[in-house]
Amino acid sequence: MNIWKKSTQLEITCASTKSQDTLVLYYNILDINIADRWLALIEKNKRREHSLRYNYRKILSPSEIEDTFYEFKNNIDYINNNYNIQLTDPESVEHLREHPEILNNLHEQFEVYGDRLANFVETGYFNNPKQDSRYNEVWPGMRQNKVLHEAFLRLNEQIHNFEAIYRTWDNSHRSVCTCLVDFMPAGLHEPLQPEDYLLFTPEHYWGWLYLGYNTLGKHWSSACHDDDVEVVRRNQIRPQARFAAEMYMNFKDTGPSTTRIELYKWWLENDFSKDKDPRMLLEELALGFIPVGKIVGYKVNNTPCIDVNSLKEHNRWNLMVWSKFDSIKSINIVGSNE
């Protein structure tokens, strides 16, 4: 059975801020209904000339990790100067590694911010702020602070970036090479259909393309990986319920997946069955992500396209090709070329 679309591919162009080089990736797309709906959302965003937003993860040198931490602290400083709740300010890369609860606490505050802002918008606070008993000059203030909102979105990315860095701390060549890409401004999305939940998989393979989570909060896989027991205790696990044009490019060479086993052991260790019924429906679990495509070839600049099946070592490609770039330049739906 052929599972791929015969005449459609996705072309993703990566760029570098340090050179004029480009990396073009070609993806075959799964012949499934949700992939059609996802491609339609991509086209709709492109017609509206929405800009790309991405979180490009590559193999980082020690100095790049320090630079990343400096940007993280600066972002937290900005939030603390423009928000009415003070976030924890990590001291150093090593201190943050020794105290992973800081990242979980910061993620909780990111969720709190999102819920608070949604409530202010839904209840019409910004129509007449000074007449509202919840008015606070620092935040929410007189109007929505779009710069602060971007800072919180960046904070969420930075939290997950450091979680990924620390998971591979003792083996940098296993560093997480991924990229989460979306279009801005956000707002174009569709609900998942009941049948779509059959597609969720915790097995994430090198070179595959998945739908983004596109939901405020943490799902079961994320909470387990982060050992975030409190998010379960607070009943704040939020399975994916919708999707957007957002996509997750995966270049982690993880081998056989143990996600279900890890979740099982984590569940028992924390005795979650006291408060949660493990006999969940598919949409309550939604474990992992929905696959929509797979890389088949790539080229650097104007070199001939290289078939990824010819690669002998994915980790070497991650280091010598993917990690030479740091941004996404364009995304285009094109006709396939065997």
Image (cartoon, rainbow, N blue to C red):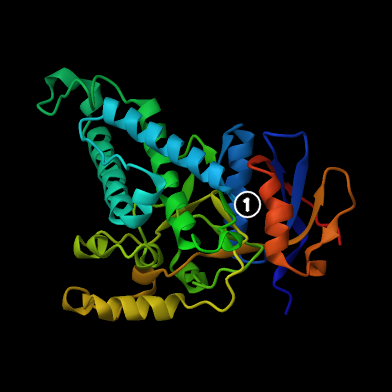
Answer few, some or many: residues within 10 Å of disc 1's Cα (few below 14, many 20 plus, some between 14 and 19).
some
Where is residue 146 drawn, in percent x and y? 38, 27
Where is residue 7 drawn, in percent x and y? 79, 59
Residue at 38%, 69% in the rendered image: 283
Of residues 290 and 65, the one drawn nearer to the viewer in this rendering:
65
Q: Which residue is mark 1?
A: 39
Q: Quadrant of the C terminus?
A: bottom right
Tally of numbered discs: 1
Where is residue 106 drawn, in percent x and y? 30, 47
Determine whether, in the image, residue 154 is placed left or right of residue 20: left
Task: Tell me, yes or no, if residue 28 can be seen here.
Answer: no
Indicate the quadrant where residue 310 lies.
bottom right
Q: Is residue 88 above or below residue 272?
A: above
Determine whether, in the image, residue 229 is placed left or right of residue 59: left
Amino acid residing under circle 1 = Leu
Q: Is residue 73 above or below residue 333?
A: above
Indicate the quadrant where residue 17 lies.
top right
